[in-house]
Image (tube, rainbow, N blue to C red):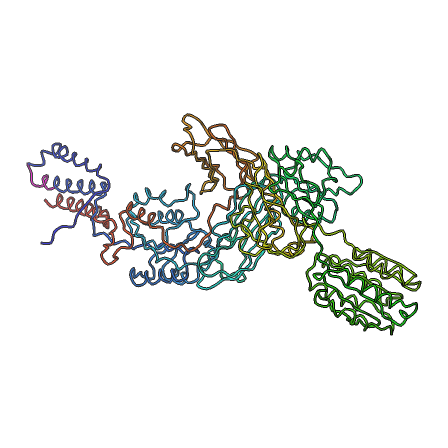
């Protein structure tokens, strides 16, 4: 006999009605005496029992039905097409759903549909899901509407970017999932390949600097593409482009640096941006920019004094361009007012003689330097010993001992340019000129050089420039070759004289021009040539005009521009005496050396920092001086086996002094003026001389950053104990005009505070340390705090494991070993059977009572 199926009642409280049967039997006890009455009582009892069972909801229990699993599929942009293809293969091959198996697809929003409709969407996710977000919390909230006791297969990387919880986290739904018996089985996809992207990893700049000082700005760029990426790197200072460069980024990290001088003062933002040539090589454009903030102190002031305005033109320009506040004074201007040096950080005496300076300045500069000022003396023909500074208070402050002007025996190179045109026959002018040349030769030393060029329409070299000792015996015969003929054209002869003189060394190079007529050619051509000879080659030119026909105005100007003498005579017999007069020379000052010399830098000189990778240009002259004991030779000169100073420096009292023995106006320093390092050299020399501003000793450091809640401020103490003291911060920015709040002491020497904000932009921060000192203002640029959807290197396993363990599931389970849960037992109500049976028994009782 088969066992009876299990029975149950849905309203067990009605079963108490069975207590009425004994009362009913007691009331009908007489019925037990007769058969007919007993049968009637029996049938009535059965009818009453069936009615009680019907009222109690008697039903049969059948076996439970296995529940259908639920697929939850992440289609956000953080999953690549390759990962979504893996999701489809995993569902088809491992989970094997039926076409009607329910699926829930989600990103920022979710949607429920059968697997047969969800499968094609894995290849082309619909935009209405808001693919640029991941709301896992919202998707699991949608799962709560499904039937109880069900396996939920979650295919997602577990990274969230939106939701209602703060912070966003799907763990907030866990209690409801457990209550409904929903087990989560996460299937994390394999890690995504590195996205093709370029990002600025770091923008490095010092937190503070002085106005005009050069800082190094570095930009680290990371390229995750398999190949090189080309693009443009731009650096802006407060919205103005200060550096722009095309770059090629190899895979990995590339570092670029740029030297920048900040002339503005205050808190200066530096903003770096990278723009790829191909947008396809950059998945996340938002990380192509970064901002650094530099606190710039006001620029230093420099007083630049010179005897002539043209001497200042180079120094004033380079120092101003390097961020120094330069006040240039030309002492020959009327009126020339010299400001007090006390209002300047450094005073520069640029080729200016002592007698051009106010007496109060001369006597006060020594004390000015001793008290912390800077002094720089730049050489020239009116500076150092040549300027009369020997024995003055200024010499005491300089790192060199000055040499007074000394005479040197001249070593002369004399070139005679003599007109031999046809007109020179008259009045024996050519004969007197030849006699003057012979007299000059007799008065020159064997170590002097002499050359003679005759000219008509063409130059004629009579005596090539040579030492007298070699040609003295032949000089008379060679001069006899001068014969008068032809026209007059002086310019080619002057050019030949220049060619011969510029190849020779002499303390004095001199040209004497003699003519009796028009010179030919344009006046501007002569003046340009004479100026070049005098300024560049230090050749002096004198002119002698004979008779009434020469161009006296031009010849006098040639002598003026050439730095020589102009003679005019109508008596040819005076020519020999005029030639002899040109031999007279006041002598060169030995203290001034004019020849090309090679500088030798000192490797460890702080004035030449960063300049040891390039040779220094030569100088064409300098003023002799001797290095004082205790001074530093920053640059020496290679001169006849000696090392005279070109640049010397030392500390004097609390200040600093520098001497540069060449000039800065281009006469001796023309190679320096055109040198690419000229600006940097003078900037570093001047900045070294500036008073040292000792930074306030502080045992505190501030670091700014951000997290998901806002601006993060960390204060670190490295000094004495700050026990019992408090720290605070004040923030201003786009979200608030000013907000002050205390910093929490996390540990000894570490304070932290967070200014809660989600508003991106530029913020100013001032920190009050426990000692009461204020640090800042500091700057920080807060980027957008909501991250953009992007493939991640690893899935969020901690979150996925938490979801699985809390609901009784597991990560990446063996699906074949899982037993799908069954639903509650099936209920079959017996009411349709009980009522008819009760009615049938009632009629049977009527029939039995009539028959019996």
* Residue at screen point 25% across, 50% down: 823
User: Which residue is painted at 32% across and 53% down in the image?
Assistant: 186
Question: In front here: 59 or 202?
Answer: 202
Extreme residue in the top direction: 724
Indicate whether 466 appears above or below 394: below
Picture coordinates of residue 554, whole percent (x, y): 86, 60
Q: Residue at x 35, y 57 (%)?
A: 189
Magenta span has 495?
A: no
Q: Position of residue 561 (x, y in %)?
A: 80, 56
Q: Quadrant of residue 353?
A: top right
Question: Relative to the observer, which residue lies in front, 64 or 124?
Answer: 124
Q: Is residue 624 left or right of residue 97?
A: right
Question: Where's residue 844, x and y in %?
Answer: 15, 47
- Quadrant occupied by the C terminus: top left
Residue 438 vertical placement versus 700 (above, below): below
The reply, left or right, for residue 380 in relation to residue 552 is: left
Number of labelled discs?
0
Magenta stretch, residue numbers: 33-39
x, y percentage for residue 125? 44, 59
| Quadrant occupied by the N terminus | bottom left
Q: Is residue 210 visible?
A: yes
- Which quadrant holds residue 329? top right
């Amino acid at each position: 006999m088969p066992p009876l199926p299990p029975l149950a009642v849905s309203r067990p409280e009605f079963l108490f009605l069975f207590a009425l049967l004994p009362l009913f039997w007691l009331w009908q006890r007489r019925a037990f005496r007769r058969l007919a009455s007993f049968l009637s009582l029996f049938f009535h009892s059965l009818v009453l029992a069936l009615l009680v069972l019907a009222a109690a909801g008697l039903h049969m229990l059948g076996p439970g039905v296995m529940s259908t699993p639920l697929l939850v599929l992440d289609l956000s942009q953080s999953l690549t097409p390759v990962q979504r293809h893996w999701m489809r293969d995993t569902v088809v091959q491992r989970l094997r759903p039926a076409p009607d198996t329910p699926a829930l697809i989600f990103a920022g929003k979710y949607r429920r549909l059968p697997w047969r409709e969800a499968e094609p969407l894995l290849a082309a996710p619909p935009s209405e899901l808001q693919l640029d977000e991941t709301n896992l919390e919202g998707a699991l909230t949608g799962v709560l509407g499904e039937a109880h006791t069900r396996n939920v297969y979650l295919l997602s990387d577990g990274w969230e970017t939106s939701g209602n919880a703060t912070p966003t986290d799907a763990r907030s739904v866990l209690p409801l999932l457990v209550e409904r018996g929903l087990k989560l089985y996460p299937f994390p996809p394999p890690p995504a390949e590195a996205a093709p992207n370029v990002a600025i990893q770091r923008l490095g700049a010092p937190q503070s600097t002085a106005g005009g000082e050069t800082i190094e700005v570095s930009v680290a760029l990371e390229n995750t593409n398999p190949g090189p990426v080309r693009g443009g790197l731009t650096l802006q200072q407060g919205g103005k482009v200060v550096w722009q460069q095309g770059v090629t980024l190899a895979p990995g990290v590339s570092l670029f640096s740029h030297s920048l001088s900040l002339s503005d003062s205050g808190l200066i933002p530096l903003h770096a941006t990278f723009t790829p040539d191909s947008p396809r090589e950059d998945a996340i454009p938002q990380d192509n920019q970064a901002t650094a903030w530099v606190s710039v102190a006001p620029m230093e002031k420099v007083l630049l004094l010179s005897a002539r305005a043209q001497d200042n033109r180079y120094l004033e320009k380079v120092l101003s361009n390097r961020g120094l506040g330069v006040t240039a004074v030309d002492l020959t201007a009327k009126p020339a007012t010299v400001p007090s040096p006390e209002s300047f950080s450094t005073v520069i005496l640029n080729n200016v003689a002592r007698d051009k300076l106010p007496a109060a300045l001369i006597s006060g500069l020594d004390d000015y330097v001793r008290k912390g000022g800077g002094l720089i003396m730049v050489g020239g023909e009116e500076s150092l010993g040549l300027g009369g500074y020997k024995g003055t208070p200024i010499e005491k402050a300089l790192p060199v001992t000055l040499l007074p002007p000394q005479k040197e025996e001249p070593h002369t190179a004399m070139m005679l340019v003599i007109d031999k045109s046809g007109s020179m026959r008259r009045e024996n002018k050519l004969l007197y000129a030849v006699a003057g040349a012979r007299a000059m030769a007799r008065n020159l030393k064997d170590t002097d050089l002499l050359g003679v060029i005759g000219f008509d329409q063409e130059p004629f070299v009579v005596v090539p420039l040579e030492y007298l000792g070699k040609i003295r015996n032949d000089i008379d015969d060679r001069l006899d070759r001068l014969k008068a003929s032809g026209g007059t054209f002086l310019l080619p002869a002057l050019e030949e004289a220049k060619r011969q003189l510029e190849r020779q060394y002499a303390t004095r190079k001199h040209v004497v021009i003699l003519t009796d007529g028009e010179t030919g050619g344009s006046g501007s051509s002569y003046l340009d040539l004479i100026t070049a000879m005098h300024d560049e080659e230090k050749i002096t030119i004198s002119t002698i005009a004979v008779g009434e026909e020469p161009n006296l105005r031009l010849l006098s100007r040639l002598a003026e521009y050439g730095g020589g003498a102009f003679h005019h005579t109508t008596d040819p017999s005076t020519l020999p005496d005029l030639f002899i007069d040109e031999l007279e020379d006041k002598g060169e000052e030995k203290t001034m050396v004019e020849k090309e010399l090679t500088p030798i830098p000192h490797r460890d000189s702080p004035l030449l920092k960063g300049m040891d990778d390039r040779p220094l240009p030569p100088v064409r002259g300098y003023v002799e001086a001797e290095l004082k004991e205790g001074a530093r030779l920053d640059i020496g000169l290679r001169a006849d086996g000696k090392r005279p100073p070109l640049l010397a420096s030392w500390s004097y009292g609390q200040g600093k002094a520098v001497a540069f023995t060449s000039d800065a106006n281009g006469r001796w320093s023309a190679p320096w003026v055109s040198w690419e390092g000229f600006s940097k050299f003078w900037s570093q020399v001047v900045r070294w001389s500036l008073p040292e501003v000792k930074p306030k000793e502080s045992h505190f450091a501030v670091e700014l950053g951000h997290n998901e809640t806002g601006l993060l401020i960390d204060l670190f103490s490295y000094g004495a104990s700050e026990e019992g003291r408090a720290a605070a911060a004040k923030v201003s920015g786009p979200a608030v005009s000013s907000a002050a709040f205390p910093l929490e002491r996390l540990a000894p020497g570490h304070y932290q505070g967070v200014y809660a904000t989600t508003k991106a932009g530029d913020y100013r921060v001032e920190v009050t340390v426990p000692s009461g000192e204020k640090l800042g203002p500091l700057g920080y640029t807060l980027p957008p705090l909501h991250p953009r959807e992007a493939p991640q290197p690893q899935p969020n396993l901690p979150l996925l494991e938490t979801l699985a363990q809390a609901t009784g599931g597991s990560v990446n389970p063996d699906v074949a070993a899982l037993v799908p849960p069954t639903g509650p037992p099936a209920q079959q109500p017996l009411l349709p059977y009980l009522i008819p049976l009760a009615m049938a028994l009632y009629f049977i009782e009527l029939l039995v009572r009539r028959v019996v």
